[in-house]
Image (tube, helix red, strand yellow):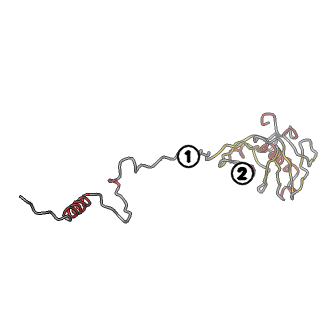
């Protein structure tokens, strides 16, 4: 029995239909980006990565020793709380502030006036005095210089203090009653800076 001859194009049509059918079952393609919902993202991918960089905590305040004058007798050490880290200028500003009522009741005072600044180099603190310094009585000048020397040389790395006025070295009272324009240390004020505060 002789069958009907099949047309050669039927196989191509069948293959094309199969390809179209399979393409319909595949993953659809997108031409634009879209944001995936959180619940559709695999677990673990939404967590934030902790930072490995740590910033050291700076102290909110630091305790600084200052030297206050008495009505008579040697200087007396006291402490103040300053925002950390405290600079030399911060310490001098604190030294120029009136003592606490309790300190004043105990006979403590300060001869240091505001507007004095300092910097340090090679172990020597250079202090620029304000214009009022030259108008102060000699006893107040001696107390102020001794207070500054006592306070600044208590800081690490400072052994001497050089005083300046109007940008030039100026003579200041020394502990023996003389004046000097050289750098001074705690040893120059033995009666005002006792060994207990050296």
- In the displayed structure image, the side of residue 5 where residue 58 appears, left or right: right
Residue nearest the viewer, comparing 47 with 16: 16
Q: Residue at x 35, y 52 (%)?
A: 41
Separation (CA) of disc 1 from disc 2: 31 Å
SS class, disc 1: loop
Q: Is residue 145 above or below residue 193?
A: below
Q: Quadrant of the N terminus?
A: bottom left
Locate residue 78: give its quadrant: top right
Q: Nearer the viewer, mark 1 or mark 2?
A: 1
User: Can residue 27 be seen in the rendering of this structure?
Assistant: yes
- In the displayed structure image, the side of residue 32 where residue 98 appears, left or right: right
Locate residue 197: give its quadrant: top right
Q: Residue 51: image x %, image y %?
A: 51, 47
Task: Classify 10 Å Cα crowding around label 2: few (below 14), some (14-19), many (20 and above).
Answer: some
Q: Is residue 185 above or below residue 27?
A: above
Residue, disc 2: 90
Q: Residue 61: image x %, image y %?
A: 63, 46
Residue, disc 1: 53
Give the number of callouts: 2
Residue nearest the viewer, comparing 177 with 56: 56
Q: Residue at x 35, y 49 (%)?
A: 42
Residue nearest the viewer, comparing 6 with 83: 6
The outermost residue toward the left is 1
- In the displayed structure image, the side of residue 6 where residue 42 appears, left or right: right
């Amino acid at each position: 029995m002789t069958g009907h001859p099949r047309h050669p194009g039927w196989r191509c049509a069948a293959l094309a239909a199969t390809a179209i059918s399979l393409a319909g079952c595949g993953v659809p393609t997108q031409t634009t980006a879209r944001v995936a919902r959180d619940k559709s993202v695999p677990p673990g991918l939404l967590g934030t990565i902790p930072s490995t960089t740590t910033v050291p905590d700076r102290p909110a305040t630091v305790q600084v020793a200052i030297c206050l004058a008495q009505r008579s007798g040697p200087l007396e050490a006291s402490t103040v709380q300053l925002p950390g880290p405290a600079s030399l200028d911060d310490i001098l500003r604190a030294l120029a502030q009136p003592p606490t009522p309790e300190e004043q009741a105990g006979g403590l005072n300060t001869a240091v006036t505001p507007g004095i600044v300092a910097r340090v180099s090679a172990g020597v603190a250079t202090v620029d005095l304000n214009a009022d310094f030259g108008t102060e009585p000699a006893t107040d000048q001696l107390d102020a210089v001794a207070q500054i020397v006592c306070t600044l040389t208590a800081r690490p790395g400072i052994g001497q203090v050089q005083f300046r006025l109007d940008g030039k070295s100026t003579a200041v009272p020394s502990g023996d009653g003389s004046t000097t324009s050289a750098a001074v240390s705690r040893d120059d004020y033995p009666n005002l800076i006792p060994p207990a505060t050296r």
